[in-house]
Image (cartoon, rainbow, N blue to C red):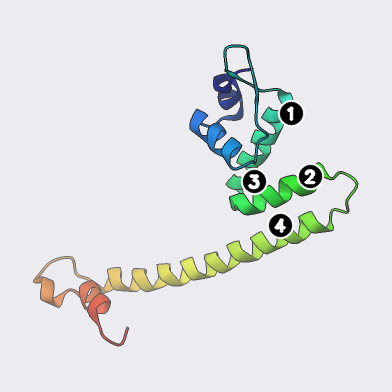
Amino acid sequence: MNIGQLAREAGVPIDTVRYYERQHLLPTAARSAGGYRIFGQQDLRRLRFIRRAKALGFSLEEVAELLALSDRHAQDMGSVRDTARARLADIEQRMVELQRMQAALSQLVDACPGHGALEQCPILAALTEDNA
């Protein structure tokens, strides 16, 4: 299949395919006599793997690690679990931080009457406080 077909079936833009190829997440594609990239089902499976891993929040570096582990079928799955556990811990930490930010911003929004002079705006005051 050509790059357009691969991108369409994997649900990604063509530029993403090229980028992943440059980043060595996808192997360099074979070329037709006309110089067009030729991809197979293994490339499609790999591209879908990358897309799904990215959707779960894995960085490209972590995706590369997972792909390397995936390519070594005889290896124990503990390494994959450790990588996923680290990603989960990072997501949980970000959620705690986002909840803290939500609570703080919610308090500021609730404190703002939404009318009046800007110099009395509690949101701007909180953002410009020296001890914040």
Q: Earlier in the sequence, mark 4 or mark 2?
A: 2
Three-letter code for the amino acid on which mark 1 is drawn: Gln
Residue at left 71%, top 52%? Answer: 65
Measured along the vertical axis of the image, is residue 7 above or below residue 88? above
The residue to which callout 2 is attached is: 70
Q: Residue furthest right?
A: 74
* Left or right: residue 102 compared with residue 23: left
Q: CA–CA distance between discs 4 and 2?
A: 13 Å
Alpha-carbon span between mark 1 and mark 3: 16 Å
Q: Is residue 95 left or right of residue 111?
A: right
Q: Nearer the viewer, residue 39 or 36?
A: 36
Q: Residue at x 76, y 61 (%)?
A: 82
| Image depth: mark 3 or mark 2 in front | 2
Please give the residue where the numbered disc 3 appears in the rendered image: 53
Q: Earlier in the sequence, mark 1 or mark 3?
A: 1
In terms of sequence position, does the residue under pointer 3 or pointer 4 come before the other?
3
**Circles 4 and 1 in contact, beta carbons < 8 Å:** no
Residue holding disc 4? 84
Which residue is farthest left?
117
Mark 4, secondary structure of its residue = helix
- The percent coordinates of residue 36 (x first, y second) are 57, 18
Neighbour tally class for label 2: few under 14, some 14-19, many 20 plus, Cα within 10 Å: some
Residue annotated with mark 1 = 42
Q: CA distance from mark 3 to mark 4?
A: 10 Å
Residue 35 image point, x, y percent: 57, 17
